[in-house]
Image (cartoon, helix red, strand yellow):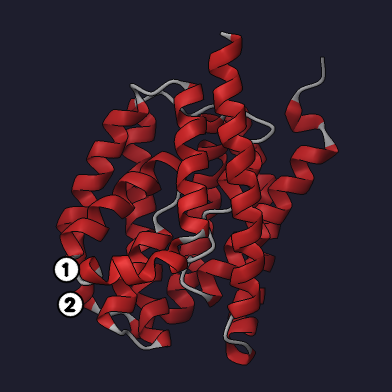
Amino acid sequence: MASPFDTPLFWALAVLGVILTGISKSGFAGGAGVLAIPLLALVIPLPAATVIMLPVLLFMDVRAIHLYRKQVSWVELRRLAPSVLAGIIIGGILLGKLSANALALITGLVSVLFASWQNLSGWLKRFQQASWFWGSVSGITSTLIHAGGPPISVYFLGRELEKLKWLGTAAMLFGLMNLTKVIPYQMNGFWEKHLFFVSLWLLPAAWIGIQLGYIIQKHFDGATFIKICRVLLLVSGCLLIGKGIMGYVVT
């Protein structure tokens, strides 16, 4: 039986997810950057998908920080740092305890929630400026499935950050978060040599996505791009929920 890494479907989903993540990270502060993991998890185990994406995300972070390094709000970073670190610790503990089926279900549910989070904005406004809440949620979801962007987006909306300040602060925050996540991934024994080589092959797609995002944000508000990503996220999330449920039924 052929390895999923040898199939055109895997590489098509991987390249699509990485490019869209790069566009989102450098152009729209990562708001749609959760898409790569649900897409990859359709064809490979979820832990493998998260490991493949971490070096790719770190590569994107370096480029995004370089582009927006002068726009960072250090006040917001200091406000978020303690809760984000607590969230990463909690997420790291959960990584070693959750089964593959449970992770698939969680990923699917989080994907569906984040695909529709703007529809929940009226309810969320009551908590929009609670840095302790959104920071910890971001740390947990980022550690589990690299989905820390939407919670931080909700918080930044509440803080009414202007676009470039938002992009710079998000770039620095996620760069530090992703670097910290190397530790729980190592502690849970996730690193494998062949997955690292897959990450290397995806770096050109990451570079393309980052460059496209930087160009796009100068000319568009990103609304159409975010809507497309939200639809893809909703569909992939529903498929993952089905995959997780079927995993429990079969076993």
Circle 1 residue: 78
Within 10 Å of disc 1 (Cα), the crowding (few <14, some 14-19, many 20+) is: few
Whole-number angstrom distance, CA of label 2 to CA of label 1: 5 Å
Q: Quadrant of the N terminus?
A: top right
> How far across and how far down the image is residue 139, in percent?
30, 50
Circle 2 residue: 75
Q: Quadrant of the C terminus?
A: top right
Q: Amino acid at mark 2?
A: Val
Task: Look at the image and tell me whether residue 172 can be seen.
Answer: no
Question: Which image quarter: residue 135?
Answer: bottom left
> How far across and how far down the image is residue 33, in percent?
53, 59
Element marked by disc 2? helix
Element marked by disc 1? helix
Front in this rendered view, residue 94 or 61: 94
> How far across and how far down the image is residue 144, in percent?
40, 39
Front in this rendered view, residue 13 or 55: 13
